[in-house]
Image: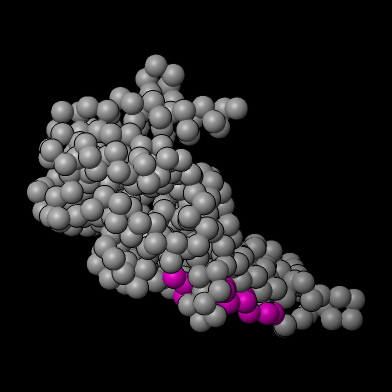
Amino acid sequence: MFVDEVKVKLKAGDGGNGCLSFRREKYEPRGGPNGGNGGRGGDVVLVGDENTTDLVDYKFMPHATAQNGEPGRGADQHGASGDDKRLRLPLGVQVYDTISGQMVCELLEHGQEIILLNGGRGGLGNQVFKSSVNQAPRKITPGKPGEEGEYRLELKTIADCGLVGFPNAGKSSIMGLMTKNHPKIGHYAFTTLQPSVGVLEFPETYERLTIADIPGLIEGAHENKGLGHRFLRHIERCRMLLFMIDMAGEENRDPLEDYAMLCNELELYQEDLKDRARIIIANKIDEQPAAGDNLKRFRAAHPDLKVIPISCLSEEGVSELRDALYNAIISSAAE
């Protein structure tokens, strides 16, 4: 199960109460006040974790509370502070306040820590209030309550490349060939039901990049049609877009119309995606006689685009695609 959006109710720990106490020892009938202060409540801390992939843990445990501070004790003993509640979240998570709808923060780096809710301050014991004119104070203060709130956690996957295309275009097949990901592959539409991120490794240079496989888009995806509407946000942070186009024209499809429709859906969802770097993966180049003609038509219509013909069946062109991704992502970053 892939979960990319959850609602949670979080609360920081309450501060401990101050203690009302007087020293009582033999031969010390008027030992004076010795009530300690209460401990501070624990904070709710968000921690970015690159080893966490989604929000499934918080779907089944939507409530989290930090530890309360201990109350003060006699003999001038202050209460211990409560432990923080640390929530490990995948990179790319945005946190929204459910009441105002405003984004509170986001996690983009591994190890990044953000204090979302502060714990309550501990109360004061009566020893704090002693003075020359008040040698036996009976005043204490209670601990302050910790902050609390309800939030919506929304994950936007961080990946180098976003793989988009119509259902049954071959996205899962190319992911299985190029990465260690093992997606479900079938000869029917919507085989992929949730986004997945695969790692493309280059052993010769010890480099790697990540590819996010987005479930198949259809016309009207930006209007909540099909499966793609929930997952379009996962391509927002991708540095490059990979368009998987069926050049064989199966099911009476036209590759040129498919590409135009995909571009339109992405632009309607977020306008600046039209300027994102892209590579066209011309799949199924050997499955239909018309594939070669469609490839020529496509290149003539888009001479400025990088088009790489491949076949997921024979693995033709896969090595060229790997090289193109290496040059576009890793080599360009090094420069």
Residue 317 on the magenta segment: no
Instruction: State which quadrant residue 127 falls in.
Output: bottom right
Could you tell me residue 253's position as x and y percent? 19, 55
The residue drawn where x is 43% and y is 21% is 206
The residue drawn where x is 81% and y is 75% is 130
Residue 304 in the image: above or below residue 223? above
Horizontal side of residue 259 vs 253, given as left or right: right
Instruction: State which quadrant residue 282 falls in.
Output: top left
The colour scheme used to paint the residues is one colour
Could you tell me residue 123's position as x and y percent? 66, 74
Pick the front one: 125 or 168: 168
Horizontal side of residue 86 vs 310, given as left or right: right
Q: Looking at the figure, which quarter contains the N terminus?
A: bottom left
Q: Looking at the figure, which quarter contains the C terminus?
A: top right
Number of numbered discs: 0
Could you tell me residue 149's position as x and y percent? 51, 76
The residue drawn where x is 42% and y is 40% is 303
Asked if residue 234 can be seen in this view, the reply is: yes
Pick the front one: 269 or 60: 269
Residue 176 in the image: above or below residue 228? above
The residue drawn where x is 18% and y is 49% is 249
Residue 174 in the image: above or below residue 16? above
Magenta region = 140-153
